[in-house]
Image (cartoon, coloured by chain):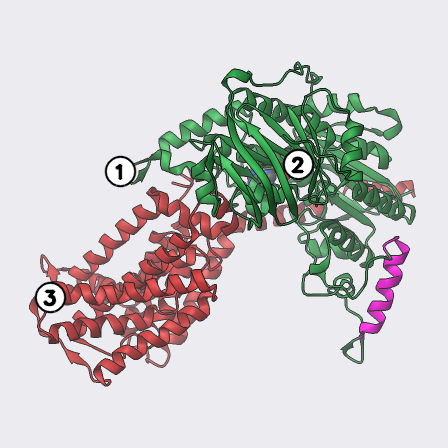
Chain colours: A green, B red
Amino acid sequence: MVPLLEVHGVSKVYGNTRVLNQVSLKVEPGEILAVLGHNGAGKSTLIKLISGVELPNEGSVLIQGKRVIMTSPLEAHKLGIGCVYQELHVIDGLTVAQNLFLGHEKTKKGLLDMQAMRHESRTLLESFGLSDLDPDSLGKELSHPQKQMIEILAAINMQIKVLLLDEPTSSLTLGEVDRLLDLMRLLAKKGLGIIFITHKLKEALAVSDHVTVLRNGSVVLADHVNNVHEEQLVEYIAGKRLVENTESNVSAHSDDSSEELLQVSHLSSGKALDASFTLQSGQVLGIYGLVGAGRTDILKALFGLEQITGGTITMSGQPYVPKTPTQALAAGLYYLTEDRKVDGFIPGLSVALNMVLPSLAAFEQNGMIKFRQIAAKVETFMRSLNIQVDRETPMANLSGGTQQKVLFARALLVPGIKILMLDEPTKGIDIGSKTEIHSLIRQLGREGYGVIVVSSEVEEIMAVSDRILVMASGRMVENYFLRGQTEEADLLRAALGGKSRVQSA
Amino acid sequence: MFNQRRVPKETGIFLILIGIIIVLGLVAPAFLTVSNVFNVLLNSTTIALLALGETFVLLTAGIDLSVGAVLALSGVVAAEAFGAHLPWEIATLLGILSGSAIGLFNGIVIHFTKVPPFIATFASLGIASSIPLILTSAVPIGIQNNVFQDIGQGFLFGVVPIAVLILLLMAVILHLGLTMSRFGIHVYATGGNREAARLAGINLAKMDIAVYTISGTLAGLGGIVLASRLGSGYPTAGSGTSLFEAISAAVVGGVSLFGGVGTIPGALIGAVIIGSLADGMNILNVNSYWQPLVIGLVILIAVTIDTIRTSRRRSVRITKVVADAMKPAESSRETMNAK
Ligand SMILES: Nc1ncnc2c1ncn2[C@@H]1O[C@H](COP(=O)(O)OP(=O)(O)OP(=O)(O)O)[C@@H](O)[C@H]1O
Ligand SMILES: [Mg+2]
């Protein structure tokens, strides 16, 4: 059988760096290929080469045995290759049906045939188990995962043969992930070839037929999924055996020196209702819950981004009424957002300037910025966080995981910060760096920061927290004190069931 | 500063300027005399001052349509001040400050009412162009003051126009401000990603108000230079194409209309390109009906060349890959054999 898609020894060079080196792979009809690798391994670049965003410096791409050169995503589309990026492009002001037919609308006598489009949309939605979606609802009424499904179906609707998915699950909750994986299986059954990029090995093992692991731009493993197991994949991705986090389960801080940094009582804001908790210096407080449980709203309220509708906050004993991020930063709070592309960094500015943006004042003398001092400081942090890029590179050119590390460094550079609020801190981060970031969070606790970590990953919350709060539908439903005395299953049950057994802090 | 180790971004547009100068110098030898070169710079001064101010606004992804109208306002305010027998320093300052006031107003309205900059500054264009007409009943007011006259008509050492020195001084100050100060980096950050800038603790109200005030102030200064050259406050000065020339100058010089990209030297070069063309065509006696057409086309060509230049690496790659593709691919032959 002729493979649907064949990539033959492609390489990609940016400036002096070889980002991809002689990479080959193939996808048969009905096959799901998982592409794995560390941050910056070249996964997204590979996708760009296959989808017409970039051209390879050497090597070739073959579709159904024929060599093709795609100089634009549109051309790739015409050749049957569809790509769903992490940033979704569903248009808010158009209906589901219009979004599904965008660019190839059905017409009758020169006018839009809404009737036909609506009808076909409904059939399409039903055939993929999405009959709960109304073809007439507007793009802006959809949730993130719904938009993602619509985008995938829109690609399918254009008769594509190969679907490329770059980290499609990183913003989804457990149930939504399952739904997406089911959809992928269904698509494969209909003969589509799928390339699936993820940092979550369990997903890859669950859904794919073959796995390809990239390391530093080269293929280091390509095999049938039945021939590989998880530990082996970890080793190939990280290039070494990862040491399990064997840190003792005792609380990170020594009680005598710790002070109460934050006291939140009966706080209501956005989706969060009546939240009460305290945070000590040297403590890592995990807030676990499903996406949409109101966890981010608490962080936003504390950072002056969301209107507080009830309750009080005291910081180090003083009443604290956050109004603006500027004020929150001055008070010693830092907020690392979940969506780094949307509100995290300035794409056109360099890594160095992005890293020091909130702390520029510290590098100023007589109104002039001391770029040399910035460079020195930035280099130190890049070394300690293992960020291997040129500090003058524009932030937009970094891989997703590296961007996150730069933002982490940014938080640590702001003088006077006592409280770090980290929203999904390892979203899109590879397994190797993930353990690094987890140890970093633990270390920050030991250094005396108060850290609040919001995460939808049970393993992550368990790995970093001294104390765990569980939220469900806007309310705090559980409050566990001792690190190491909680079971994953307890957390999951609390988050899903939302039982109201609040213990006071 | 942002890319210390790379070629400055202005190189391309600077080469285009050199090209235009060489061509004009060849076809009109009178163009490349010292006095004419300064004359070109002098004629570009007003537009250049507007373009420098506009650059700050464009960098934050805004736009300021009121700068042309401010030219007239500032000149007339200064002329009225002279009429009230105020000393030249005060009259000049009042003229400039009238521009700052319009800018401040723009910034406040845009930030706090969230009216889009295009509409808000179009409204203040109306305000700024009406006030001088109302004040003067549309009659130009002559200014008789030797010091004031020197601002636009005086020369240092008999050759260097004082207005050009003022322009260069402003350009240096603004360039340093934009590249070496915290404020400057905040300007780029605000235009590059407004929400991320806000979360990084940048006070957006301060930024919006500051950039529009800077733009208004420079337009006020431009109005003073213009009034000094004309020897009077003209209530209809700047009502023509000044605004569009200023924005075009900035864009030709590489300032993006989408924010976050651009430099002061670039905007300055852009203004000089437009000034040289106008001057060159006058020397060559090009029919004045044709001049805007030529300037329009040259702006289009200059920006196109620069856009292509910045994405050239990609097109070079395309040609290479296409050439590779002409050779028969082994793998496709294999697959064909497999059939
Ligand atoms: N336009 C560019 N210019 C220069 N370097 C680039 C450019 N785009 C990507 N890179 C570099 O190429 C490397 C591979 O990036 P890529 O985005 O493909 O990684 P990735 O495997 O998708 O990582 P992640 O898991 O973090 O998303 C990175 O080191 C990145 O900095
Ligand atoms: Mg990627």
**Magenta residue span:** A113-130
Q: Position of residue A211 (x, y in %)?
A: 81, 32
Label 3 packing within 10 angstroms: few (<14), some (14-19), many (20+) = some
Q: Are marks 2 and 3 on the same chain?
A: no
- Judged from the image, the secondary structure of the residue bearing numbered disc 2 is loop
Observer-nearest residue: B253 or A101?
A: A101
Q: Quadrant of the N terminus of chain A?
A: top right
How far separated are the C-alphas under marks 2 and 3? 63 Å
Say if A201 sits above or below B106 in the image.
Answer: above
Question: Which quadrant of the view contains residue B35?
Answer: bottom left
> At label 3, which amino acid type do we have?
Trp
Question: What residue is at 27 percent from the left and 76 percent from the top?
Answer: B237
Q: In which quarter of the image is the C terminus of chain A?
A: top right
Instruction: Name the chain under label 2.
Output: A
- Judged from the image, the secondary structure of the residue bearing numbered disc 1 is loop
Residue identifier under label 1: A366
Residue B26 is at least partly visible in this image = no
Ligand 1 occupies quarter: top right
In contact (CB < 8 Å): disc 1 and disc 2: no
Q: Which mark is residue B88?
A: 3
Observer-nearest residue: A467 or B261?
A: A467
> At label 2, which amino acid type do we have?
Lys
Q: Is residue A116 magenta?
A: yes
Question: What residue is at 41 percent from the left and 41 percent from the top?
Answer: B2
In contact (CB < 8 Å): disc 3 and disc 1: no
Q: Is residue A203 magenta?
A: no
Question: Which quadrant of the view contains residue A3?
Answer: top right
Residue identifier under label 2: A427
Instruction: Name the chain under label 1.
Output: A
